Image (spheres, rainbow, N blue to C red):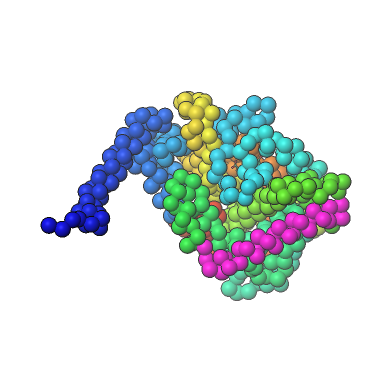
Amino acid sequence: MGTLSFFDLTWTWSPWLLWVAASATVASAIGRSVYLLYFHPAAKFPGPKLAAISYIPYCYHWIRGRYPWFQEQVLREYGHVVRVGPNELVFFTPQAATDIYGASVKHQEVFLKTDLMDFGAGDLGFIWESDPAKRKAVAKKILPAFSSKATKEKEPLVHAYLDLFVRRMKEVGGRPEGLPMNDWLLWLAIDMAADLAYGRELTHLKDGKTSDFVETIRGTSFVGTLVQLSKRVTIIGLLAPVFVPLRVMRSIPAVFKANKAEVQARIDKRGKTKHPDFMDYMISPEDPPPASKKELTHIEQVAFQMFIAGFDPVQITFYAVLFFLLKSPKARAILTEEIRSAFESYEDITPEALARLKYLNAFIHETLRVHLTTPTGMPRLSPGAVVDGVYVPKGIVVQLSSFTAMRHERYFADPLEFRPERWLPADHALYDTRYANDNLKAFFPFSLGPRQCTGREIAWSQTRLFLAKVLWTFELEGVRGHDKSFDDDFSVHVMWNRPELYVRFVPR
Ligand code: HEM
C-alpha cells in the first residue's frame, strides 16, 4: 500500500473542510442575526426584520435611487421611528428634528456628524467636519462670509451670472425644440458657485457647452453613493470603480489637478481679486501662504466644499422652480403678474424688493417643500439621548426624513399637491383657509441648529433673483419633461436624476 501524499490528503479532507467552513459561516450568521434582533442596543426599535439584520434594504433602495421614498414608506408602516439598518434609525417629526439637530452645548452640536461625507481627502474642511472643536476653528474664519453684509457684497456677482443666463436665453432659448435645462441650469449654478467660492472663472454658460469638470461631477454621482454605502458594507467599495464612466475615469486626475491649481492661483492672488468670494475669509490678503501641505489641503477642502454647497442645492432649486412653473400654469400666471407689476424695469429687480413679494416667496417655499434637496437624511451619532420621546443609546446613527415630514398629511393639507397658497399670509387675496392648519414647523429644507445651512440668505436671494429675472423677461413654454411626475420619474444618488426638461424662452 502506497503512502498518501499532501495532495491526496487535501483532496480527502476538502469536503470536510468546506462543510466545516460553511457550517461555521451559517452559525456565525445565525448568531449575528440573533444578536442584532434581540440584544443589539437598537433591537427595541420597530422596522423590517431584514433591515435589522443587514443593510440589504438600505443599500438596495439607495442603489435604485429611491432611498427617500423607502424612508417614507417604512415610517408610514412602522411609526415615528424605524430601524432602517442594524445600527441606524430614521425619524420624521418636528420634535425629532429639534432633538437631533437643535441640541447644542455652547453653540456646538451634540449629535455629531458621521463619516458619510469622508471621501478620504485627509481633511474634512468645514461642512463635512465631524469634530466640533475643529469645525469651530474653521467656522470662526468662514462664518462672517455669510453675514448679511458679506452676502450683499457678493450680490453684483450673482446679478452678473443671472444676467448672463438671461442674455444667453435671449440668444439661443427661442428654438422650437427648447433648451435642455439639466445642462443649462447646471452650467449656470456651477459657473456662479465656482466664482463665489474661490474666484474661479468658468465659461460653460457663455460657451453653451459642457466640460470634463462638469462631466466628472455628474459622472461620480452614482459612484459617490457606492462609496457612501461601502462605509456600511465594505465590499460595495470594490465595485465602485466599475461604475465610473470611461470618459470620467480618464479625466478625473486632470480635473482634480486643475482644481488644485485654481485654488493655489486664488491663494496667490489674495488681495488682488476682482470681487469678494468665500476664500477671502479663509486666507486674507495679510495672511502668509499656507505653511504646510496639511494647511493647503485644508484650504482646498473648504474651497471645494463651498463650491459644492453653493452649486448643487442651487441647481436643484432652479430646476425645481422651472419644473413646477411649467406644471402649474395658474401659479405661473399669478407669479408672472406679481413680478411684472412690481418693477418698472429689469434693472429695478433687487433681492430686497423681491423679499417683499408674497407669492414669489410662497412659490419658493412650496418648491423647497415638495422637492427635497438634501437626500442623505443628514445622519448623526446619538450621544445617548432622548429623541422624539424615546431613548436612543449612544453610538446609534439617527437621521431625519424631512422628505416624509414635508409630504405628510399630518402637517400639510393636500401634501402631494403643489399649492403655493399654503404659505400666503391671511390678509393675501389668494389666502386659502384650507391650508390654515398646516404645521409649518415640519418644514426644514435648510436643517436647523448649529449645523444648519449657513448659505440660506444667499440661496434665497439667488432663487428669488433667478425666478424674477426669467419671468420678467420671458414667456416660458414647456416643450417636454414638465409632464413627468416627481414621484415616478425622479430618483437620487449623490445628485438628483431628473427627466430632461426642454424649455422655450420667448422674450415678451
Ligand atoms: C436652496 C439652496 C440650499 C439648500 C436647500 C441648502 C440646504 C442645506 C442643508 C440641509 C444643510 C445641512 C446639511 C447637513 O447637515 O448634512 C446645509 C449646510 C450648509 N450649506 Fe446649504 N443649502 C442651500 C444653499 C447653500 C448655498 C448657496 C451655500 C453657500 C455656499 C450653502 C452653504 C452651506 C454650508 C456652508 C453648510 C454647512 C454648515 C455647517 O456645517 O455648519 N448652502 N445646506
Residue under the point 50% across and 35% down? 398
Q: Which quadrant, please, contains the C terminus?
A: bottom right
Residue under the point 84% across and 46% down? 287
Residue 242 percent coordinates (x, y) = 47, 62
Residue 185 percent coordinates (x, y) = 64, 61
Q: Is residue 355 left or right of residue 330?
A: right
Residue under the point 68% across and 52% down? 304
Q: Which quadrant, please, contains the N terminus?
A: bottom left
The residue closer to the viewer here, 436 or 154, is 154
Residue 296 visible here: yes
Magenta segment main secondary structure: helix
Q: Which segment did they paint magenta?
A: 244-273
Is residue 256 in the magenta section? yes
**Which of the 4 quarters of the picture holds residue 189?**
bottom right
Residue 434 visible here: no
Residue under the point 49% across and 36% down? 397
Q: Is residue 24 left or right of residue 95?
A: left
The residue closer to the viewer here, 100 or 34, is 34
Q: Quadrant of ligand 1?
A: top right
Q: Residue furthest bottom?
A: 176
Instruction: Classify 469 as above or below 404.
Output: below
Residue 107 percent coordinates (x, y) = 68, 29
Residue 236 percent coordinates (x, y) = 44, 53
The residue closer to the viewer here, 234 or 70, is 234
Instruction: Classify 99 as above or below 340.
Output: above
Is residue 3 in the magenta section? no
